[in-house]
Amino acid sequence: MKIIAIALKNLWRSFRSFFALAFMFGVPILMTVMFSFLFGGIGGDDSEFTIPVTHVMLVNQDRGTDLQIGFEMDKNTYSSMGLMLLEILQRDTYTEIMTLETAIETKARKMVDEQQAGLAVIIPEDFSSALLGQSNRTTQIEFYKDPELSLGPQIVQSIVMSVVDGFSSGSLTMSSVTSALQEKGVDLNYEEQMALIQDLSEEMENDPLNSGQNLNVIPPLAEQDAKNQSDSLQTILRSIMSGMMIFYAFFTGTAAAQSILQEDEKGTLPRLFISPTTTTTILNGKFLAGFTMIIVQVVVLLVFANLVFGIYWGATFPLLLASIGLVALANSFGIFIMSLVKGTKQAGIIYGAVLTFTGMLGISSVFVMGTPIEKAFNYLPLLVPQGWAMNAFTATWKGDWPQILIHTAGMMLLAILFFFLGNMRFKKRFN
């Protein structure tokens, strides 16, 4: 009962503090609200997520192929598939996604370097030949983008590749036929290859299943777009909210443990020690207060994010596991950190340097989403306790059970280690 009484006393003191409440609830919520407005509104079905318009420089170096003089699409004939790609990207379908301009390669790269364009799409000389299976070497479209941009160029790149995949599927028949003939020892000369292409083209045109345009370009702002935009916004807000929750949960755990140092300097803690209450009971009561504070903080933020932003955190049981791991780890890490300092003056350094650095590293995956270094930050944050918590919550909403179990187990092991070391050091100090 004495443990509970000490815990309740510390809880009452903490929840009466405006500073503590601001760090526990105010800052995480305000940060998420700010990002919500930046990305188009507060969650829910009516939210709007505006896709940025990207200025694209297209460099068409495609020389076509002698194997086929013209490529037909929508009753128009083009000398190369590069020109067909240009025509498709210039359609009104994509005006809300990109503005397209053609240029030579040097000018396109210069425009991107000077941030006058967000992306340069460079089509190689053997683009048509490669799609028809007539090139002996691997070829590829080069995407040269502004490193400061991620979402816009990434969307354009996906659109370009989806169109190219459509070209590839239309060219597979020719490639499959010639490969099959070569396996049988039959090599077609130029005239025979031309005749085969003509026959295949006429057969596809006469096939009712392939009538009309062979390449079906799906507009990016179709009926499903509202749902995709809502999902994109929720993913961003969910990552930000979970990152802020984890970041400030560790501050709460450290602040709760710091109260031991504050009471020691004020002289209230020594008076408790000379009472019939044991040192173990006093310390465990204060540790219980910190544990309870973080539970309240995590539950309130999870529920608030779900009700206000419409954030789905995943199935209940894995979310419970990740939350328990976070609460235990944040509280024990705070105990351990405060057990290393001698007074409240040194504790300021912990807040300003150690917790800020470990916290930012732990949630750094939030800030590198969609960048080339994103994969590296799946593991680098594991160098600090916050990274284990962030990965656990990420695995929770993805429904990745192996990762949930691995990172939750890691959090619990670290929590036990930190609590044991911190508890031992505090008892040694005050006994």
Image (tube, rainbow, N blue to C red):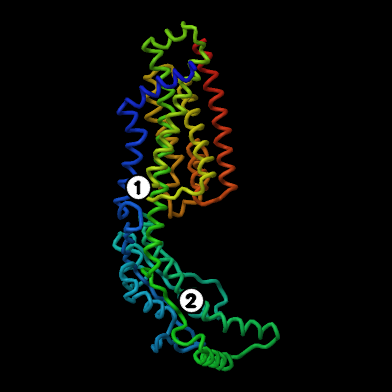
The residue depicted at 45 percent of the width and 40 percent of the height is 361
Which residue is situated farthest in the front direction here? 1
Q: Which mark is residue 166?
A: 2
| Front-most of residues 375 and 66 | 375
Q: Is residue 384 among what the camera can see?
A: no
| Front-most of residues 21 and 317 | 317
Q: Which mark is residue 308?
A: 1
Give the spatial CA distance, label 1 vs label 2: 41 Å
The residue depicted at 32 percent of the width and 33 percent of the height is 22
Quick one: label 1, few (<14), some, or many (20+) residues within 10 Å? few
Residue 418 in the image, given as x and y percentages of width and height? 54, 27
Per the image, label 1 sits on a secondary structure element best described as helix
Labels 1, 2: front one: 1
Q: Is residue 201 above or below residue 113?
A: below
Identify the mark nearer the N-term, 1 or 2.
Answer: 2
Horizontally, residue 192 falls left or right of residue 73, namely right
Occupied quadrant, residue 303: top left
Horizontally, residue 100 falls left or right of residue 173, namely left
The residue depicted at 38 percent of the width and 9 percent of the height is 267
Quick one: label 2, few (<14), some, or many (20+) residues within 10 Å? some
Residue 123 in the image, given as x and y percentages of width and height? 43, 73
Amino acid type of the residue tagged 2 in the rendering: Gly
Residue 311 in the image, given as x and y percentages of width and height? 41, 49
